[in-house]
């Protein structure tokens, strides 16, 4: 790997990091001010009904427990 390749690689890495931070900030902002009315009645992924207790515990939640675990696992792998 010559110097130019190295610079290009770290540019790319820098851009990914910025994107990841921006995504995270957007996700956090999306949670601000959510109420139970913003919670989905059915899971956005599998369309199973989301229990009322879960909707109250996680205002704005869009997924059931099983799908959320899948998403968390996928996110932690990334
Ligand atoms: Zn689901």
Image (cartoon, rainbow, N blue to C red):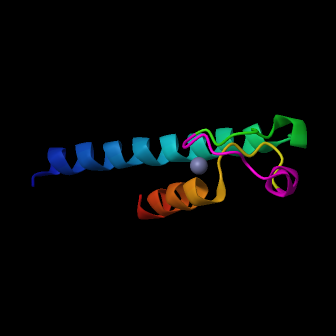
Q: Where is residue 60 in the image (x, y as percent from the top left)?
A: 79, 42
Residue beneath the point at 63% across and 45% down: 48
Residue closer to the observer: 61 or 30 = 61
Q: Residue furthest left?
A: 1
Residue beneath the point at 41% across and 44% down: 16
On screen, residue 67 versus residue 3, left or right, reads right
Residue closer to the observer: 46 or 19 = 46
Q: Is residue 43 magenta?
A: no
Which image quadrant: the N terminus?
bottom left
Q: Give the range drawn in magenta.
A: 45-57
Q: Count how many numbered circles sit on residues in the image.
A: 0
Residue beneath the point at 41% across and 58% down: 78
Instruction: Please say whether residue 35 is visible from this viewpoint.
Output: no
Residue closer to the observer: 30 or 61 = 61
Whether 70 is drawn above or below 39: the answer is below
Residue beneath the point at 58% across and 59% down: 66
Q: Where is residue 76 in the image (x, y as percent from the top left)?
A: 48, 64
Whether 77 is drawn above or below 15: the answer is below
On screen, residue 20 versus residue 77, left or right, reads right
Instruction: Please say whether residue 57 is visible from this viewpoint.
Output: yes
Q: Position of residue 64 (x, y in %)?
A: 65, 52
Q: Quadrant of residue 35?
A: top right
On screen, residue 55 versus residue 24, left or right, reads right
């Amino acid at each position: 790997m010559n110097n130019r390749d190295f610079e290009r690689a770290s540019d790319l890495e820098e851009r990914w990091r910025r994107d990841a931070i921006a995504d995270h900030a957007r996700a956090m902002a999306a949670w601000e001010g959510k109420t139970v009315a913003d919670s989905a009645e059915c899971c956005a992924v599998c369309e199973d009904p989301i229990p009322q207790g879960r909707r109250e515990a996680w205002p704005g939640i869009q997924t059931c427990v099983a799908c959320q675990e899948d998403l968390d696992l996928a996110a932690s792998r990334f």
